[in-house]
Structure formats: structure tokens, C-alpha cells
């Protein structure tokens, strides 16, 4: 049994993986009491043989997880860092470590599942876009603010744009709250569509598979004017592929 950790910008997701799939899983936001929530959730689940983690957060939060895992299970965390190549995926970045490990592992999961060629869109605090060929070559990608961060940035940089209630996503809005929400969500949808269409036109014959993950993936899906699907827990699934490919790493 392995414990897999996905340390994202907003929350931490975890799963216990066995030969039959996830035996337990959960998530906790960083603004919660992580040091209390995780031991409470983990203590009755048994002791994992290995613990693997992927992190896009700071060293302090990684150290916090290392301490929790050591206290609960007497295990060390093996942090997966972005390589130039691994599990059949070749990193397009000239400086491989600068590609977020979450993006790399999402491609590993997609490649292992036979979903490439594909475009992967992470819809969370940030919007991340990556293109992957059928033979595992990463073509590169884009990063932009996610829909909620985009709204926060707009509200923080303006004086008179101050909605009194959360907006509703509409094609055309007749009030400020709806205009802000609709503009930001539609901007993200438009960028995903443009990226996917450009990649499809330049590198393949016909549209590639479009996979969405992240906390806001299900909300974005119906806004897209192209075929797409939610591929949940892509980082955890990529970690599991990595663990199977690196059995000697502890």
C-alpha cells in the first residue's frame, strides 16, 4: 500500500493506493488545521509501505507533511521532482525542473492511460495548459490565472468594480457581478479552446483529446465549445504510475 500526496496551491489531496485502486482518499485546504485533520483521517487506515509526494508549494509546507507522515507512520516522504524524461513522457522545457511537477505527472497519467495525443488543462488557482503527443513528447504549454484568481485580481485592481454578491455565468450580463464572473470564466474557456485548436491544427490531423483537471474543472466543462472530459486526480494517478515505475525508490 502506498500513500500518495498532491500538494497544490489551495489544498492537499491524498490517496491510499492498493492493487485494487484507491482504498481511501481525501483532501484538506491549507487554511484548515492540516496538522489535526490528516492524522485523524489517517490513523485507522493502516501503515503504507511507501509515501510519495508531488508539491508546488513552499518548503515549509513540505516539511510540515514530512513531520506528519513521520509521526503517524514512521515513514519518509519521497518527493517526486520534475525530470527531463520519465514514465514515457519527455519534458519540453530546456530547464526541466522549472515545469511544475503537477503538470508533468498529469501528462504521465494521460500517457499511461492511452489518452495521448491530448491537451491537458489544469483549472485551479492557475490555469495550466500542456500538449502531449502520442509518443510522449511534451510540446510545451501556457500558464494564466485561473477563473477565481482572475476575478480576485480584477476586484483588487479596480475601485468601482465591487459586486455585492457572487456573479452568475451568462453569455451576456446586465449587472456587474454577473459581468465579472462571466467575463473571467469565458476568458479561461476561450484560452483553453484556442490552445487546443492551435495544437490540433499545427501538430495532428483533427482534434486532440482535451482533458480537464483541478478544482474548477467541472464548472468549466459546460462552457467549452469543443469536446472535452474531466480527468480527475491526474496528479495522484501520475504519482501511482511513477511509484510503479520506480519500485526501488524510497
Image: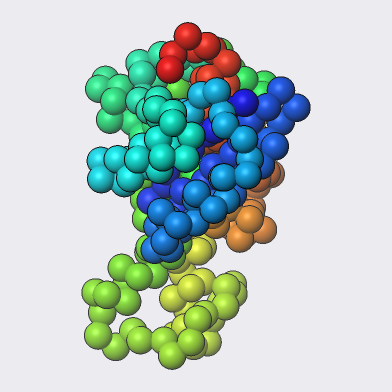
Residue 101, above or below 223: above
Furthest residue toward right: 20
Pick the residue in front: 171 or 75. Answer: 75
Pick the residue in front: 176 or 13. Answer: 13
Identify the residue at horizontal 62%, vertical 26% (top origin): 1
Classify residue 57 by image quadrant.
top left
Residue 157, above or below 137: below
Identify the residue at horizontal 57%, vertical 78% (top origin): 168
Identify the residue at horizontal 50%, vertical 64% (top origin): 185
Residue 148 appears left or right of 172: left
Residue 8 placed where, x, y %? Answer: 42, 46
Is residue 57 something one can see in this rendering?
no
Identify the residue at horizontal 56%, vertical 29% (top origin): 48
Is residue 144 something one can see in this rendering?
yes
Residue 127 placed where, x, y %? Answer: 43, 49
Pick the residue in front: 224 or 198. Answer: 224
Residue 131 appears left or right of 47: left
Classify residue 93 by image quadrant.
top left
Pick the residue in front: 38 or 121. Answer: 38
Residue 170 placed where, x, y %? Answer: 59, 74
Furthest residue toward top: 248
Amino acid at each position: 500500500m502506498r500513500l500518495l500526496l498532491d500538494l497544490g496551491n489551495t489544498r492537499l489531496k491524498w490517496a491510499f493506493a492498493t492493487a485494487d485502486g484507491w482504498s481511501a482518499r481525501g483532501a484538506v485546504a491549507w487554511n484548515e488545521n492540516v496538522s489535526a485533520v490528516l492524522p485523524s483521517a489517517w490513523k485507522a487506515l493502516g501503515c503504507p509501505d511507501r509515501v510519495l509526494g508531488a508539491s508546488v508549494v513552499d518548503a515549509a509546507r513540505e516539511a510540515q507533511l514530512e513531520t506528519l507522515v513521520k509521526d503517524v507512520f514512521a515513514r519518509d516522504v519521497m518527493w517526486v521532482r520534475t525530470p527531463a524524461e520519465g514514465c514515457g513522457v519527455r519534458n519540453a522545457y530546456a530547464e526541466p525542473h522549472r515545469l511544475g511537477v503537477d503538470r508533468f505527472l498529469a501528462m504521465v497519467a494521460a500517457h499511461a492511460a492511452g489518452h495521448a495525443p491530448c491537451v491537458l488543462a489544469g483549472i485551479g488557482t492557475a490555469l495550466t495548459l500542456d500538449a502531449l503527443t502520442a509518443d510522449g513528447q511534451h510540446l510545451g504549454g501556457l500558464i494564466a490565472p485561473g477563473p477565481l484568481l482572475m476575478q480576485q485580481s480584477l476586484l483588487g485592481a479596480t475601485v468601482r468594480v465591487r459586486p455585492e454578491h457572487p456573479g452568475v455565468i451568462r453569455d451576456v450580463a446586465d449587472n456587474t457581478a454577473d459581468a465579472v464572473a462571466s467575463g473571467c470564466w469565458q476568458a479561461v474557456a476561450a484560452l483553453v479552446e484556442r490552445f487546443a485548436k492551435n495544437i490540433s491544427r499545427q501538430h495532428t490531423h483533427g482534434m486532440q483529446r482535451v482533458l480537464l483537471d483541478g478544482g474548477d474543472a467541472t464548472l468549466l466543462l459546460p462552457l467549452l465549445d469543443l469536446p472535452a472530459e474531466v480527468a480527475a486526480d491526474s496528479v495522484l494517478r501520475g504519482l501511482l504510475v511513477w511509484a510503479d515505475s520506480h519500485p526501488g525508490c524510497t
